[in-house]
Every structure is written in C-alpha cells, then in structure tokens.
Image: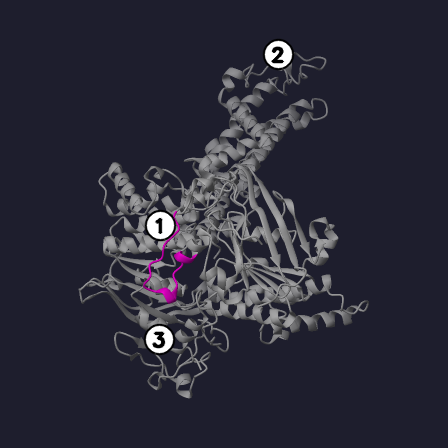
C-alpha cells in the first residue's frame, strides 16, 4: 500500500496539548478552579506517504485532539509537526492558510459539519474561493459538480440545502469539500461512526477508492476496531494522551503486546466466533485526564502492574518490523490473558 | 452518538431547493392570527407612508372655533372631523395618522441602529472572546443596570430635543439586547463543526463571523428585534408624553395623550384615541412577532 | 440455549404502528410478530427506519401522538396489554417490563440524584416495602437502591446515591439506567441500543452485566442493536428488521452462519470483520426507502441484487424449518 518513497509525509515530534493552565484575572476573581487537561502528552510518530494510519483508543485518549492538533485546528502547546518538509507548527498565519490546501479533515457528525444556511455548491466550493483555485463562479460550479460526481452525489443537487440530504449523503458532501482542493493528507475523524451500518460500508468503500485514485494519505481516527482493522495499513493505540502501541495493523491487532491493547482486543465482539476471546477485565475506572497517574499511565488498571510501573514511564520498545510498544514488561513477553 | 436517519431524507424531496428561510416563512403564514396581525402592521405602515393623501385635514391647522369638538357620532360633532378635535381645534384623526409616522419611523430607526450595533458587537464578543468579549460584556452589564426611561430622559436632557436625538437616546441602551442574543447564539454556533470546517479550510475570522455564523443567528435576532419594536414605540410615546420627544407642533401620539390630560373629564377623546392607537399598534406588533418567533425559532420547529 | 416452553412471555402479533405526519402516513411498524420466551435473550437488529425501537415502545405503551397503534395484539403473560386501562398498564411498566434507552444522559433526569430516580421506581411498584411508617419505608427503599447500584457494579454505592447523572461517566450512566430498570425485578428487560454510545470495553462490561443478571434473575431480555457482533455474542435468537417489517428470524448462530434473506446477507457482507481481514466488504447499494405510503411489495426490492418481478407483490413470512423464518419468495417453504 505505501508508495516507494522513504521519507515520511508527516513527522510528529513530542506533540503536547494542554487545556487550561493559565488563570486569567476574571477566573481568579470569580474563584473558578483552574482546569488543566493534558489531552496530548508528548506524542511522536510518523505518517508515511500513501498509507492509512489508524488511530484507536477510547474516550478521553486524545485521538480526536491529535488529529486536530496536526492541522493546528487546536494549537499545540508544544512540539513539532513537519509536513512534507515544512514545519507546520512554525508557520505564520498566512503561510498556514496556504498550507491548508494540502491537509484537510473529514468530520464525524454529518449534521453539524455542514452550514444549514448555505447551499451544497457554496459549502463544497468554499476551499476554491478561499484559495483562489477558481477564476469565476462558473468554474467553481464546474469543479464542484466534478467532485460531487466523484463522491457519488447527483450533480443536479448543487443548489440544494443540507437538510434535504440523508446522513450518508451529507457525509459525502463533507468528503467532497475536503477533496476539492486536491490535498495530500486527510484526517478522517470518525467519518462513519454516526452512520447506519449499511451506509458505513458505502462510505468506507468510497474512502478507500478515493485514496487509491487520488493518491491520498489518511490518518483514520475511530473507536471501531473492526473498521480500523479493515482499512488501515498501520495502527497506533492511544491511552490517556499517549501512544502505547503502534505497528502494522495485522501484527498489532492479532498479536498485541501492550496490556491495554490486549484488553481492548479481548472486548471486541466477533460476529463469526462468539465467545472465543477470554475477556480481560480491567480493574478500576479510567483516570481523569486532569490528574493522570505517574509512571506508566496505564498502571492503575493493569493487572500486571509492578512497582516500577507505578513510578517510571515505560520507554518505547522496538519489537521489530515497525512494531513498538511502551511497557516495562515487554521483554518478559507476558500476556494479560491468562 | 445516535445513528443518522437515512430514511427521512426522501420525505424531504417535497421541499425542493427551499431554503430554511422560505420554509419558516410558510410556517408563519399558516398561523392566521399572526398573519392577520402582520397585515395590520402593514396597514399602519402604509398609513404612515401615505399620510398626506389619507389624512382628511392638515394636522397642524388650528381652528379655535372647533376647540374640543366631540367625535362625529356624538352631539355637536361633525363627520368630517371623525374623532373630534383637540384643545387647539386640530383634527385628531389627521394628527393620529401623521403621528403614526413618528412612532413607526422612530421605532424602526432605533431598532435598525440598535440591531446593527448589537450584531457587530455580539459577533465580536462571541467569536473573538478574550478582551473584546470582556470589554463588551461589562459594558452591556453596566448599561443594563440603568433604568431605561430614566436613562433616556437624562440623555435627552443633555442633548436637547429633536428627532435625531431621540433615536440616539433610545438606541443608546437598546443595542445591548440584540447584542446579548447574538453573543449567546454565537457562542453556541462557534462550537459547531461547520465552523471548525471553515477554519480547517483556511477561512479568516472575518469570513467565519460574516458568512458562517451570522446567517445562522439572524433568526432569533430578527424575532427579538421585532418584539422590541413595540417597547421602543411605547418608550417614544412616554418620552413625548413627558415633553421630551418631538416638539410641537409635530404630532406624536404620546404628546397627544399628554395634551389631553387637562381635559380628560370633559373631552375624553383627546387623550383616548391616541392612546388607543398606541395600544393597537403595539398589540399587533407583539402578536405578529410572536408568530414570527414560533415560525422561525428552531426550538419550536424541528 | 432454552427449550421452547408452553406460553411465551411476550407475544406480539400483527403489530402496526402508524405516524400521521404532514407529508403522509408512515407505518413505522407494519405487521410485526415478536415472540419472547421466558429466560431467553432476543436480539433485534435493524438500521434507521427499521421500526425496531418503535415496536418495543408500542409494547410498553409509550407511543404518543402523532403516532398510535393501528392494529395488532400484544400479549404479556397471556394478558392483552392493549386492553388494559392506563393505571393497569402503569403497573406493568417498570415492574414487569422495563426498558432502558440509548442515550443515558438524556434518559436520566438531570435534576434528580441517582438515588432519587431509583427510589421513584421502588415507591411506584415495590410492594415489599413496609407500609405506613414513612421512615421505615424510606430506609428499606434506600437499602434496595444501594443493593441495585452494587448489583450493576458501581463502587461506594451508598455515597453515590447522592450524585447527579452528569457526575458519572457514560458507561456508569448506562449501568444506572439498568439499575433503575431492574429495581423491581422485571420479567422482561428491553434494552434499546444499550451500548451504541459506549467504548468497546465498557460495552463489554455492560453486556456481561446484563447477561449475568439475566441468568441470576431468570429474566428475559430483548437487546435492540445495530451491531451484529453484539447479537452474535449475547443473544439466543435474532430478529432482523427492515423498513418496518421483520425480514428474518431464527437462532443466532444459524442466522449468522447461514443468512437466508438478501438483506441479512448484505448486512453481513458489508461489515468489516477482523477475522475476515483481507476480504473486501460489499456495501448494499441504495438507501432505505421512503416509508410514506409504501406500496405492498418487498421493501428491499430497490436494493436487492436478486430481485424478480414477482417481488413486486406483497411478501409474507415463510417458515424455513429449524425455527427459522424469512420474508423472501425465493426461499423454499417448509410446511411447519
């Protein structure tokens, strides 16, 4: 699936995103307690040209924040993002705006992601207008029609409003909008989670087809492990703002080495082989992102936690073939499954 | 996350190409009471516009022989001076017709000015946040603390009478009301994904405020503003009643009511008819704008 | 798996629920038969517009204008629920049949503490609470509430009674809803999409909880979901619904390994499965049809790859043997 280029398309170094922290005079005056949510805690990875990198994790793990921080939709607190040789995190606003042509995002909610007061033509054509990619209105409409056709929408619906479309069709509109500026990279933020099962399949096929035809690179964020397993080349597993395991999707999903990944995989119901997994029950509740545990973030729920785990954050171990996992017990090849 | 309803869309095919605005308008038209009130408002407006052609007499023409002449159906009255005459013998009906110009003009002007300022301030406060929001919100809070009429009286006393000054005095505080509505709506809308999508495409803050957010907050603002128009008309009438509004001989309903106070027992018609005019106009504006709210407010709709 | 007893716990026949909308009449449920036996878990699978939720809202008597039950019989333990007066129906609702909703945040009253909401149900239905003396009654009810919260796995239940719904996580709220539903030990639990909004590990916890309680209390469960994986793991029988009708029904393993109706087959082929990685998924083309004024023909017609002209007529359910039924004329009928 990856193209033969060796340089990664995107390199992320130690990306950190904290919310809150500084207390303004008003919150001091009104006595509001400071919120300090560590959504991303130093994430480093790369995205290779032409691949689909899946990002899985549960609520609060920071996967949505990561996608947006990459695009600087949420400004990272610190860290570096390099896109195709350019350091995105260092760009000034004008240069950043120009960069946006190349990196786009598809949202989860097909209802909230389209402005109800604009026509489909306006919504999809906005990138063209903003980046000067269409000389006049006629050209804009032609290009919009072309992309609508590509995503499976009827071109005579150009002047309709979002409320006249079904959920699946709206998602296609969102996809068209992301594609029209001919980007290289797209963050897909749970693009099928809000859709009916049979429509999910249509959109999944659409996304894989478009990737092939247009030579795109995807960061595919989802909580649905089966979907990630189906369309990703590599996958990264996140927990409380950190990547705990990463590697080729076959390897990570069928032979997970990090205890958290192991517990995740044991919880996924299998349509064809019900009751096959041994269920791993995690103890305790998910810690609050405001006060993450010291040492290994997972130690409060890990049945294998040792004293070292409680104190020291685990290093990233290379397990060969691009498979990495951050766990102190990795060398002992333990499994959380008894 | 609830699953999207794919089955509903084909049913909407009936609403081919209709914008949200048009659908809301149709909803409004189905409310007969509101529609009738809207028609009456229109009649008042037309009356104001075509006053010179409609009014039977010159509103400022005094005739001391007709001083306090009763309305046409009472003994001593004449049908050509249908509602009687005031203390200076001026035809009350004509003065009411001309007075509608003042009420409607001032009401409209104040609301237009206030709404424009309010939208700009509210959008800036709601979207830009930070110091802009703090400054504007505090200003709004302070202005809201002042009692409306006293404030207007104070301003008028400082600025002196005159049409322009009245509009200013009333707009001075009026803008905070649409501003608060706009700010609240903006705060809600700015979190929606289509605004984030516009940012992701590289839209400027100006574009987002004007093209993405504003069209979606106009509905509640229009509704609030039309409701406020009635209040402004009453305020203008109050100011005129107190002698701080438009100066004589210009007819304003409020000053007409004031003029008739001295004769309230012998010649009740001098105060009563202008008072009824105020009542009727304010009533139909209120009913029409309630209907507007029911038709346009998404909380009552979908 | 359970054996077929004499009387089913819930027997719905020919249910039709209609909604009068401005655009026309929508039969959200159009001729649905449901059977739930004591102690079994029935999975109800369907997408938007399938009528799966409305079917069971109708059973609970919760359908309100502009919707109403047009025809059909609903029998619970032999009693005709449609013939009951509102007060009698209220006795059944919450006590004998309980329902949980998909979105726990909106289904729980945000202004009442969790304890108060469980107590509500107990006061309404529980006849084992001591009569008369208020304090004794309250203490007994409170003790039961704590018991319920512990049953669903909420730690420090005694303290947690005072918390408000928004102070809990999504998974815990769902469990609280289950606690409220089970407070009076119902015979039938209808769980409407209990795990759709939850993470996969929490989903597993909630479903295991339901399965566990089901065994302990001998309760029947109807699990409404769109997730075939969940159905496969937890349900004895499954019922597939499409556009207001039941299109296939039977023992879960049998239906999943050998689907007979084109829609069921299409669904199974269109979901990505970890065990089938490498095999392409095949989406079902098209969309659910407009439910307004549907003509009497197969509703899956427009999306079916195996359609015939004969499918343009009214299609009834066919017995296929081995307790399986499906609504497709291409299937061989077995005389029951």
Which residue: 67% across, 64% down? C186
Does A154 sit left or right of C105 as displayed? left
Query: Residue at the location (37% across, 40% down)?
Result: A119
Q: Are marks 2 and 3 in contact (CB under 8 Å)?
A: no
Overall secondary structure of the magenta stretch?
loop
Q: Residues within 10 Å of mark 3 (few under 14, many from 20)?
A: few
Towards the viewer: A80 or C147: C147
Q: Residues within 10 Å of mark 2 (few under 14, many from 20)?
A: few
**Quadrant of image for the C terminus of chain C:** bottom right
Start-end of magenta stretch: C268-285
Instruction: Say if labels 2 and 3 share a chain.
Output: no
**Residue C273 — which label?**
none
Residue C279: in magenta span: yes
The chain under label 1 reads A
Taking B253 as reference, is A143 above or below it? below
Q: Which mark is residue A255?
A: 3
Report, in whole angstroms, how far the alpha carbon at label 1 lies from the one at label 3: 35 Å
Cα gap from disc 2 to disc 1, whole angstroms? 68 Å
Reading the image, the residue beneath label 1 is: A174
Q: In the displayed orientation, state which residue is furthest to the left.
A: A5
Q: What is the quadrant of the N terminus of chain C in the image?
A: bottom right
| Residue lying farthest to the front in this orientation | C335
Please tell me whether residue A292 belongs to the stretch shown in magenta. Answer: no
Please name the residue that numbered disc 2 is placed on: B80
> Is residue A164 in view?
yes
Q: Nearer the viewer, residue A256 or C142?
A: A256
Mark whose residue sits in front, 2 or 3: 3
Q: Secondary structure at mark 2?
A: loop
Q: Position of residue A220 (x, y in %)?
A: 34, 61
Q: Position of residue B194 (x, y in %)?
A: 39, 50
């Amino acid at each position: 699936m990856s193209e033969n280029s060796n340089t990664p398309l995107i390199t992320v170094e130690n990306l950190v995103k904290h919310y809150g922290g500084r207390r303004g005079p008003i919150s001091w005056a009104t006595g509001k307690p400071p919120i300090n949510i560590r959504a991303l805690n130093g994430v480093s990875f790369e995205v290779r040209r032409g691949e689909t990198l899946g990002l899985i994790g549960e609520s609060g793990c920071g996967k949505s924040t990561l996608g947006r921080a990459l695009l600087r939709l949420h400004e990272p607190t610190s860290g570096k993002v390099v896109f195709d040789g350019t350091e995105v995190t260092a760009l000034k606003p004008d240069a950043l705006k120009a960069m946006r042509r190349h990196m786009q995002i598809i949202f989860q909610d097909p209802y909230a992601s389209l402005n109800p007061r604009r026509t489909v033509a306006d919504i999809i054509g906005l990138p063209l207008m903003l980046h000067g990619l269409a000389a006049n209105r006629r050209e804009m409409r032609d290009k919009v029609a072309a992309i609508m056709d590509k995503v499976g929408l009827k071109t005579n619906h150009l002047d309709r409003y979002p409320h006249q479309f079904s959920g699946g069709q709206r998602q296609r509109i969102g996809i068209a909008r992301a594609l029209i500026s001919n980007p290289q990279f797209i963050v897909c933020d749970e693009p099928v989670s809000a859709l009916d099962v049979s429509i999910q399949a249509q959109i999944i096929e659409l996304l894989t087809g478009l990737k092939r035809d247009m030579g795109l690179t995807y960061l595919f964020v989802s909580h649905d492990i089966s979907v990630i397993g189906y369309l990703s080349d590599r996958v990264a597993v996140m927990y409380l703002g950190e990547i705990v395991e990463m590697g080729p999707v076959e390897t990570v999903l069928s032979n997970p080495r990090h205890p958290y990944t192991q517990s995740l995989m044991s919880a996924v119901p299998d349509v064809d082989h019900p009751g096959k997994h041994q269920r791993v029950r995690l103890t305790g509740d998910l810690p609050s992102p405001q006060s993450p545990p010291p040492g290994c973030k997972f130690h409060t729920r890990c049945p294998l936690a040792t004293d070292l785990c409680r104190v020291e954050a685990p290093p990233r171990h290379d397990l060969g073939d691009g498979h990495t996992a951050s766990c102190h017990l990795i060398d002992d090849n333990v499994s959380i499954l008894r | 996350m609830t699953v999207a309803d794919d089955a509903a869309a084909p049913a909407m095919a009936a609403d081919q190409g209709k914008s949200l605005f048009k659908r809301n308008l149709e909803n409004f038209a189905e409310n007969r009471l509101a529609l009738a009130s809207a028609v009456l408002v229109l009649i008042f407006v037309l009356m104001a516009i075509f006053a010179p052609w409609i009014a039977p007499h010159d509103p400022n023409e005094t005739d001391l022989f007709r001083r306090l002449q009763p309305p046409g159906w009472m003994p001593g009255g004449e049908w050509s001076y249908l509602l009687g005459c005031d203390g200076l013998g001026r035809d009350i009906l004509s003065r009411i017709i001309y007075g509608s110009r003042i009420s409607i003009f001032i009401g409209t002007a104040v609301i237009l000015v206030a709404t424009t300022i309010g939208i700009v301030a509210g959008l800036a406060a709601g979207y830009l946040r930070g110091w802009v929001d703090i400054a504007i919100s505090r200003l709004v809070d302070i202005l809201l603390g002042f009692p409306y009429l006293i404030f207007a009286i104070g301003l008028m006393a400082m600025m002196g009478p005159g049409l322009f000054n009245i509009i200013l005095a009333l707009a001075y505080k009026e803008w905070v009301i649409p501003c608060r509505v706009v700010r609240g709506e903006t705060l809600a809308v700015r979190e929606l994904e289509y605004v984030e999508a516009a940012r992701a495409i590289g839209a400027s803050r100006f574009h987002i405020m004007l093209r993405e957010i504003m069209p979606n907050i106009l509905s509640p603002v229009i509704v609030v503003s039309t409701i406020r128009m009635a209040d402004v008309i009453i305020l203008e009438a109050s100011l005129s009643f107190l002698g701080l509004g438009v100066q004589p001989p210009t007819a304003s309903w409020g000053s007409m009511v004031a003029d008739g106070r001295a004769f309230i027992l012998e010649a009740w018609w001098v105060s009563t008819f202008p008072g009824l005019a105020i009542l009727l106009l304010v009533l139909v504006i209120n009913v029409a704008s309630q209907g507007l709210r029911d038709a346009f407010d998404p909380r009552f709709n979908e | 798996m359970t054996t077929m007893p004499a009387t089913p716990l819930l027997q719905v026949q020919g249910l039709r629920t209609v909604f009068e909308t401005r655009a026309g009449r929508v039969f959200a449920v159009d001729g649905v038969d449901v059977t739930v036996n004591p102690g079994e878990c029935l999975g109800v699978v369907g997408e938007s517009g399938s009528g799966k939720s409305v079917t069971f809202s109708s059973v609970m008597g919760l359908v309100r204008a502009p919707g109403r039950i047009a025809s059909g019989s609903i029998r619970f333990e032999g009693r005709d629920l449609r013939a009951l007066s509102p007060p009698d129906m209220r006795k059944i609702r919450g006590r004998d049949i309980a329902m949980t909703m998909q979105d726990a945040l909106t289904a729980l009253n945000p202004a009442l503490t969790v304890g108060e909401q469980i107590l509500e149900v107990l006061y309404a239905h529980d006849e084992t609470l001591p009569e008369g003396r208020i304090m004794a009654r309250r203490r007994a009810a409170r003790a039961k509430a704590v018991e319920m919260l512990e049953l669903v796995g909420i730690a420090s239940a005694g303290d947690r009674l005072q918390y408000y719904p928004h102070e809990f996580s999504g998974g815990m709220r769902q469990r609280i809803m289950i606690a409220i539903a089970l407070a009076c030990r119902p015979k039938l639990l209808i769980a409407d999409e209990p795990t759709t909004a939850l993470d996969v590990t929490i989903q597993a916890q909630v479903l295991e909880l339901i399965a566990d309680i089901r065994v302990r209390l001998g309760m029947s469960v109807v699990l409404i979901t769109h997730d075939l994986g969940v159905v496969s793991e937890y349900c004895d029988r499954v019922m597939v619904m499409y556009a207001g009708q039941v299109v296939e029904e039977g023992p879960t393993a049998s239906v999943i390994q050998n689907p007979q109706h084109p829609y069921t087959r299409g669904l199974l082929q269109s979901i990505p499965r970890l065990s089938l990685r490498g095999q392409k998924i095949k989406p079902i083309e098209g969309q659910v049809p407009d439910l307004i004024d549907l003509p009497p023909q197969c509703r899956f017609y427009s999306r079916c790859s195996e359609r015939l002209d004969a499918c343009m007529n009214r299609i009834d359910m066919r017995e296929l043997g081995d307790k399986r039924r499906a609504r497709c004329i291409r299937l061989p009928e077995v005389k029951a």
